[in-house]
Image (tube, rainbow, N blue to C red):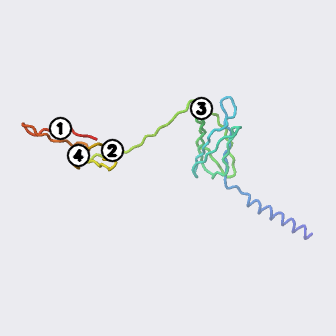
């Protein structure tokens, strides 16, 4: 009798301990990508972006993808393959211990390219009329100029020579590099 009681108590304790260790701390997203006819599309790059950054997977021969061990939160899923329009699903909510099954259909279409051009405007000093130039040694060796140091000054923009004429000094055209 005492052995049965101890065995039952041990079984209950073992079940409680294993239930405590079996608690889920993550979720998952999986799915299958198909074309408009319902055929699987292999080789699709699937990107999931969420609280911990982004992860990428490629669909298998059956068009399936899987993202296990995701931190609970809201995710965005995007699928891309050349020759197809990109498919995306924003606001996919992953909960503890939950596996979200997400089928996606990709439409046949052209590839679009996005080009982002960024740049800073050139800084112009409107308070001064001074101009300047930096001429490095490589430029001096490549450009044929005279042997005098003063000849290098004509490589700077806006530098010109005064020509003396009987009627007075006249400005010649600027010499530019």
Q: Of marks 4 and 1, which one's residue comes earlier in the chain?
A: 4
Q: CA distance from mark 3 to mark 1?
A: 60 Å
Which is nearer the eye, 171 or 164?
Answer: 164
Asked if residue 135 shows in the view, the reply is yes
Q: Which residue is mark 3?
A: 83
Q: Secondary structure at mark 4?
A: helix
Q: Position of residue 80 (x, y in %)?
A: 59, 38
| Residue 172, disc | 1
Q: CA distance from mark 2 to mark 1?
A: 25 Å
Closer to us: mark 2 or mark 1? 2
Closer to us: mark 4 or mark 1? 4
Asked if residue 127 shows in the view, the reply is no
Q: Of marks 3 and 4, which one's residue comes earlier in the chain?
A: 3
**Tag 4 and tag 1, C-beta contact below 8 Å:** no
Task: Identify the residue shown where x is 62% and y is 44%.
Answer: 92
Q: Position of residue 63 (x, y in %)?
A: 69, 38
Q: Secondary structure at mark 3?
A: loop
Q: CA distance from mark 2 to mark 4?
A: 14 Å
Q: Of marks 2 and 4, which one's residue comes earlier in the chain?
A: 2
Q: Which residue is mark 2?
A: 142
């Amino acid at each position: 009798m005492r052995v049965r009681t101890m065995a039952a108590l041990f079984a209950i304790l073992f079940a409680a301990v294993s239930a405590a260790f079996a608690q889920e701390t993550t979720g998952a997203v999986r799915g299958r990508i198909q074309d408009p006819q319902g055929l699987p599309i292999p080789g699709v790059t699937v990107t999931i972006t969420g609280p911990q950054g982004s992860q990428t997977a490629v669909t298998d021969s059956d068009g399936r993808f899987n993202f296990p061990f995701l931190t609970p939160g809201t995710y965005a899923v995007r699928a891309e393959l050349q020759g197809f329009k990109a498919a995306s699903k924003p606001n996919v909510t992953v909960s503890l211990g939950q596996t979200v099954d997400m089928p996606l259909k990709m439409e046949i279409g052209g590839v679009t390219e996005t080009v982002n051009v960024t740049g800073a405007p050139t800084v112009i000093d409107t308070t001064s009329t001074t101009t300047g130039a930096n001429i490095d040694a490589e430029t001096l060796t490549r450009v044929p100029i005279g042997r005098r140091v003063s000849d290098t000054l004509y490589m700077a923009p806006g530098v010109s020579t005064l020509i003396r004429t009987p009627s007075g000094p006249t400005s010649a055209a600027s010499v530019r590099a």
